[in-house]
């Protein structure tokens, strides 16, 4: 097993790169809207992501688990079943996103 010394410049670089991911998230301003679909069913739509599709899938999965609901991803938007306007902004802000 390889051990890394405490003052390893590579470790510092990795920490710096991780912190830039947080800055990227904070720079994204997401919008949360509710649409009514067939038969009066509500869908909460989250738009404004600039992340790669794989990251959006991970975010959607985490949101669906937190809200105990189903949902899908369409063209850089996350659609969640039900009206989640009250809880969703707080969850997204905890993830580091700005919500308008």
Image (cartoon, rainbow, N blue to C red):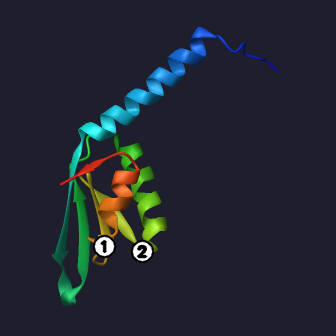
**x and y, in percent, of residue 78 in the image:** 30, 59
The secondary element bearing badge 2 is classed as: loop
Please report contact status of discs 2 and 1: CB closer than 8 Å, yes or no: yes
User: Which quadrant holds the N terminus?
Assistant: top right
Tell me the tag on residue 63: none
Q: Nearer the viewer, residue 88 or 69?
A: 88
Q: How much space separates mark 2 and mark 1, taking CA atoms?
A: 10 Å
The secondary element bearing badge 1 is classed as: loop
Tell me the tag on residue 69: 2
Q: Nearer the viewer, residue 95 or 68?
A: 95
Q: Is residue 88 left or right of residue 6?
A: left
> Who's the residue at 36% across and 49% down the image?
56
**x and y, in percent, of residue 76 in the image:** 25, 50
Q: Is residue 61 left or right of residue 29?
A: right
> Who's the residue at 24% across and 84% down the image?
41
Q: Nearer the viewer, mark 2 or mark 1?
A: 1
For residue 54, what is the image quadrant? top left
**In the displayed structure, would residue 24 be above or below residue 81?**
above
- How many residues crowd mark 1 within 10 Å: few (<14), some (14–19), many (20+)? some
**x and y, in percent, of residue 45 in the image:** 23, 64
Tell me the tag on residue 84: 1
Q: Nearer the viewer, residue 9 or 72?
A: 9
Q: Is residue 91 left or right of residue 3?
A: left
For residue 77, what is the image quadrant? bottom left
**x and y, in percent, of residue 43 in the image:** 25, 74
For residue 11, what is the image quadrant? top right
**In the displayed structure, would residue 86 be above or below residue 25?**
below
Q: Is residue 70 left or right of residue 75?
A: right
């Amino acid at each position: 097993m390889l051990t890394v010394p405490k003052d390893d410049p590579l470790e510092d670089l990795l920490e710096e790169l991780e912190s830039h991911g947080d800055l990227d998230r904070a720079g994204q301003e997401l919008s949360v809207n509710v649409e009514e679909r067939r038969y009066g069913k509500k869908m909460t739509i989250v738009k404004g992501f600039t992340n790669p599709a794989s990251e959006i899938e991970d975010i959607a999965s985490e949101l669906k688990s937190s809200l105990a609901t189903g949902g899908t991803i369409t063209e850089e938007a996350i659609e969640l079943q039900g009206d989640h306007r009250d809880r969703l902004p707080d969850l997204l802000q905890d993830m580091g996103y700005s919500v308008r």
